[in-house]
Amino acid sequence: SQQGEEDPQALSIQEGENATMNCSYKTSINNLQWYRQNSGRGLVHLILIRSNEREKHSGRLRVTLDTSKKSSSLLITASRAADTASYFCATDTSNYQLIWGAGTKLIIKP
Amino acid sequence: NAGVTQTPKFQVLKTGQSMTLQCAQDMNHNSMYWYRQDPGMGLRLIYYSASEGTTDKGEVPNGYNVSRLNKREFSLRLESAAPSQTSVYFCASNLDGSTRLVTFGSGTRLTVV
Protein backbone atom coordinates (compact mmCIF):
# COMPACT_ATOMS: atom_id res chain seq x y z
CA SER A 1 0.00 0.00 0.00
CA GLN A 2 1.21 3.48 -0.76
CA GLN A 3 1.42 5.87 2.16
CA GLY A 4 3.11 8.84 0.59
CA GLU A 5 1.95 10.47 -2.59
CA GLU A 6 4.08 13.09 -4.27
CA ASP A 7 2.71 16.00 -6.19
CA PRO A 8 3.35 16.90 -8.94
CA GLN A 9 4.33 13.70 -10.73
CA ALA A 10 6.64 15.71 -12.97
CA LEU A 11 8.07 19.21 -12.82
CA SER A 12 10.14 21.06 -15.39
CA ILE A 13 11.72 24.42 -14.53
CA GLN A 14 14.51 26.70 -15.67
CA GLU A 15 17.89 26.56 -14.02
CA GLY A 16 18.03 29.06 -11.18
CA GLU A 17 14.34 28.83 -10.34
CA ASN A 18 13.01 27.25 -7.17
CA ALA A 19 11.39 23.82 -7.25
CA THR A 20 8.68 22.77 -4.83
CA MET A 21 7.28 19.29 -4.52
CA ASN A 22 4.75 17.97 -2.07
CA CYS A 23 4.10 14.73 -0.25
CA SER A 24 0.89 13.65 1.43
CA TYR A 25 0.52 10.65 3.69
CA LYS A 26 -2.29 8.84 5.42
CA THR A 27 -1.32 7.65 8.89
CA SER A 28 0.59 8.97 11.87
CA ILE A 29 4.34 9.00 11.45
CA ASN A 30 7.50 9.17 13.51
CA ASN A 31 9.47 10.89 10.79
CA LEU A 32 9.38 11.72 7.11
CA GLN A 33 12.37 11.51 4.81
CA TRP A 34 13.19 12.76 1.34
CA TYR A 35 15.42 10.89 -1.06
CA ARG A 36 16.81 11.68 -4.51
CA GLN A 37 17.26 9.16 -7.31
CA ASN A 38 19.33 9.98 -10.34
CA SER A 39 18.45 8.08 -13.49
CA GLY A 40 19.55 4.45 -13.29
CA ARG A 41 20.95 4.82 -9.80
CA GLY A 42 19.98 4.00 -6.24
CA LEU A 43 18.27 6.42 -3.89
CA VAL A 44 20.27 8.88 -1.83
CA HIS A 45 19.05 10.20 1.51
CA LEU A 46 18.56 13.98 1.52
CA ILE A 47 16.89 15.01 4.73
CA LEU A 48 14.82 13.68 7.63
CA ILE A 49 12.23 15.66 9.54
CA ARG A 50 10.76 14.33 12.76
CA SER A 51 7.07 14.50 13.55
CA ASN A 52 7.63 17.18 16.20
CA GLU A 53 9.52 19.43 13.78
CA ARG A 54 7.89 21.89 11.41
CA GLU A 55 10.78 22.99 9.23
CA LYS A 56 14.28 21.87 8.46
CA HIS A 57 17.05 23.18 6.24
CA SER A 58 20.03 21.55 4.60
CA GLY A 59 21.99 23.69 2.14
CA ARG A 60 19.59 24.61 -0.68
CA LEU A 61 16.92 22.25 0.65
CA ARG A 62 14.04 23.31 2.85
CA VAL A 63 11.56 20.77 4.15
CA THR A 64 8.33 21.56 5.95
CA LEU A 65 6.00 19.21 7.74
CA ASP A 66 2.37 19.82 8.62
CA THR A 67 1.15 16.88 10.67
CA SER A 68 -2.37 18.31 10.92
CA LYS A 69 -2.66 18.13 7.12
CA LYS A 70 -0.46 15.03 6.86
CA SER A 71 1.70 16.70 4.29
CA SER A 72 5.29 17.75 3.66
CA SER A 73 6.97 19.90 1.07
CA LEU A 74 10.51 19.92 -0.31
CA LEU A 75 11.83 23.19 -1.69
CA ILE A 76 15.02 23.28 -3.71
CA THR A 77 16.24 26.84 -4.13
CA ALA A 78 18.36 28.17 -7.00
CA SER A 79 18.05 24.93 -8.95
CA ARG A 80 20.96 23.51 -10.92
CA ALA A 81 21.17 21.03 -13.78
CA ALA A 82 22.56 18.49 -11.33
CA ASP A 83 19.28 18.61 -9.40
CA THR A 84 17.58 16.79 -12.29
CA ALA A 85 16.38 13.58 -10.66
CA SER A 86 13.36 11.90 -9.13
CA TYR A 87 12.50 12.81 -5.56
CA PHE A 88 10.73 10.48 -3.17
CA CYS A 89 9.23 10.92 0.25
CA ALA A 90 9.18 8.05 2.70
CA THR A 91 7.37 7.69 6.00
CA ASP A 92 7.85 5.17 8.73
CA THR A 93 4.91 3.41 10.25
CA SER A 94 6.92 0.90 12.23
CA ASN A 95 10.49 -0.18 12.58
CA TYR A 96 12.15 -1.57 9.48
CA GLN A 97 9.41 -0.56 7.11
CA LEU A 98 9.43 2.71 5.21
CA ILE A 99 6.43 3.50 3.04
CA TRP A 100 7.33 5.26 -0.20
CA GLY A 101 5.55 7.61 -2.53
CA ALA A 102 5.69 7.24 -6.30
CA GLY A 103 8.04 10.18 -6.70
CA THR A 104 8.28 13.53 -8.47
CA LYS A 105 10.41 13.67 -11.59
CA LEU A 106 12.25 17.01 -11.66
CA ILE A 107 13.84 18.31 -14.84
CA ILE A 108 16.03 21.41 -14.73
CA LYS A 109 16.33 23.08 -18.11
CA PRO A 110 19.55 24.98 -18.86
CA ASN B 1 33.85 3.37 0.48
CA ALA B 2 31.90 0.84 -1.54
CA GLY B 3 28.71 1.18 0.52
CA VAL B 4 26.09 -1.28 -0.76
CA THR B 5 27.12 -3.40 -3.73
CA GLN B 6 24.63 -5.35 -5.81
CA THR B 7 25.25 -7.90 -8.52
CA PRO B 8 24.35 -8.32 -11.28
CA LYS B 9 23.34 -4.89 -12.62
CA PHE B 10 21.24 -6.36 -15.41
CA GLN B 11 19.65 -9.76 -15.96
CA VAL B 12 17.21 -11.30 -18.42
CA LEU B 13 15.47 -14.52 -17.38
CA LYS B 14 13.02 -16.81 -19.06
CA THR B 15 9.81 -17.60 -17.22
CA GLY B 16 10.43 -20.41 -14.77
CA GLN B 17 14.17 -19.87 -14.43
CA SER B 18 15.72 -19.19 -11.06
CA MET B 19 18.37 -16.77 -9.98
CA THR B 20 19.91 -15.13 -6.94
CA LEU B 21 20.57 -11.43 -6.56
CA GLN B 22 23.57 -10.72 -4.40
CA CYS B 23 24.03 -7.81 -2.02
CA ALA B 24 26.89 -6.88 0.26
CA GLN B 25 27.52 -3.86 2.49
CA ASP B 26 30.76 -2.76 4.10
CA MET B 27 29.38 -0.25 6.59
CA ASN B 28 28.91 -2.67 9.48
CA HIS B 29 25.16 -2.13 9.28
CA ASN B 30 22.89 -4.46 11.21
CA SER B 31 19.77 -4.20 9.06
CA MET B 32 19.39 -4.97 5.38
CA TYR B 33 16.47 -4.74 2.95
CA TRP B 34 15.32 -5.79 -0.48
CA TYR B 35 12.96 -3.50 -2.40
CA ARG B 36 11.46 -3.56 -5.84
CA GLN B 37 10.68 -0.46 -7.86
CA ASP B 38 8.10 -0.47 -10.61
CA PRO B 39 7.23 2.42 -12.95
CA GLY B 40 4.87 4.95 -11.40
CA MET B 41 5.09 3.33 -7.99
CA GLY B 42 7.18 3.85 -4.95
CA LEU B 43 9.56 1.30 -3.57
CA ARG B 44 7.94 -1.76 -2.07
CA LEU B 45 9.65 -3.82 0.59
CA ILE B 46 10.07 -7.49 -0.28
CA TYR B 47 12.00 -8.81 2.70
CA TYR B 48 14.20 -7.39 5.39
CA SER B 49 16.72 -8.64 7.89
CA ALA B 50 16.77 -6.74 11.14
CA SER B 51 20.03 -8.34 12.19
CA GLU B 52 22.28 -11.22 11.28
CA GLY B 53 20.35 -14.45 11.57
CA THR B 54 16.86 -12.99 11.18
CA THR B 55 14.66 -12.34 8.16
CA ASP B 56 11.09 -11.12 7.87
CA LYS B 57 8.53 -10.57 5.15
CA GLY B 58 7.79 -7.13 3.87
CA GLU B 59 4.89 -5.90 1.79
CA VAL B 60 5.37 -8.12 -1.30
CA PRO B 61 7.25 -11.33 -0.37
CA ASN B 62 5.43 -13.83 -2.59
CA GLY B 63 7.71 -15.50 -5.13
CA TYR B 64 10.90 -14.58 -3.30
CA ASN B 65 13.20 -16.01 -0.67
CA VAL B 66 16.10 -14.42 1.14
CA SER B 67 19.21 -15.46 3.02
CA ARG B 68 21.19 -13.35 5.44
CA LEU B 69 24.45 -15.14 4.89
CA ASN B 70 26.40 -13.08 7.41
CA LYS B 71 26.39 -9.51 8.63
CA ARG B 72 27.62 -8.20 5.29
CA GLU B 73 25.58 -10.20 2.80
CA PHE B 74 21.85 -10.49 2.08
CA SER B 75 20.72 -12.37 -1.01
CA LEU B 76 17.37 -12.47 -2.79
CA ARG B 77 16.31 -15.58 -4.68
CA LEU B 78 13.65 -16.01 -7.32
CA GLU B 79 12.89 -19.73 -7.50
CA SER B 80 10.66 -19.65 -10.57
CA ALA B 81 10.69 -16.26 -12.25
CA ALA B 82 7.46 -14.79 -13.61
CA PRO B 83 6.94 -11.79 -15.93
CA SER B 84 5.31 -9.96 -12.98
CA GLN B 85 8.72 -9.97 -11.32
CA THR B 86 10.16 -7.76 -14.04
CA SER B 87 11.34 -4.79 -12.02
CA VAL B 88 14.32 -2.94 -10.65
CA TYR B 89 15.54 -4.43 -7.40
CA PHE B 90 17.34 -2.45 -4.75
CA CYS B 91 19.24 -3.68 -1.78
CA ALA B 92 19.62 -1.30 1.14
CA SER B 93 20.98 -1.21 4.64
CA ASN B 94 21.08 0.88 7.76
CA LEU B 95 22.68 0.75 11.12
CA ASP B 96 19.85 -0.24 13.39
CA GLY B 97 16.65 -0.82 11.47
CA SER B 98 15.08 2.31 12.83
CA THR B 99 14.16 3.30 9.23
CA ARG B 100 16.47 6.29 9.38
CA LEU B 101 19.27 7.01 6.96
CA VAL B 102 18.96 4.05 4.61
CA THR B 103 21.82 3.52 2.15
CA PHE B 104 20.92 2.00 -1.21
CA GLY B 105 22.76 -0.02 -3.78
CA SER B 106 22.64 0.98 -7.43
CA GLY B 107 20.02 -1.59 -8.36
CA THR B 108 19.52 -4.69 -10.51
CA ARG B 109 17.33 -4.35 -13.56
CA LEU B 110 15.59 -7.70 -14.07
CA THR B 111 13.51 -8.61 -17.08
CA VAL B 112 11.54 -11.86 -17.17
CA VAL B 113 10.37 -12.90 -20.63
Image (cartoon, rainbow, N blue to C red):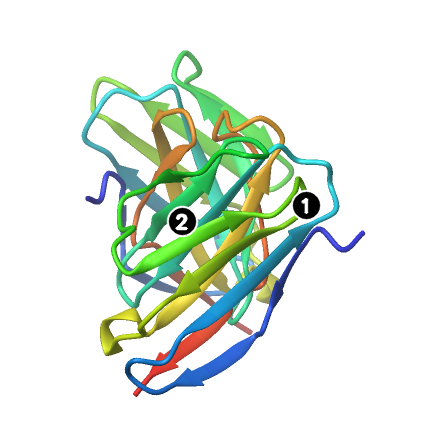
Q: In this figure, which residue is indicated by the disc labeled 1?
A: B72
Q: Is residue A92 left or right of residue A59?
A: left
Give the quarter of the image for residue B12: bottom left
Look at the image and tell me in which quarter the C terminus of chain A lies. Answer: bottom right
Q: Compared to A66, does A88 lie above or below?
A: below
Give the camera-side residue of B98 and A4: B98
Say if B11 sits above or below B90 in the image.
below
Q: Is residue A106 left or right of residue B8?
A: left
Amino acid, disc 2 = Phe
Q: Which residue is mark 2?
A: A88
Please name the residue shown 36% across and 33% down the image.
Answer: A91
Residue at 29% x, 51% y is B61
How packed mark 2 is, by other alpha carbons closer than 10 Å (few <14, some 14-19, many 20 or more), is many
**Relative depth, front residue between A58 and A25:** A25
Q: Position of residue B26 (x, y in %)?
A: 74, 46
Q: Chain of mark 1?
A: B
Establish if B46 lies above or below B99. below
Report if residue B107 is visible in the image.
no
Q: Position of residue A12 (x, y in %)?
A: 39, 66
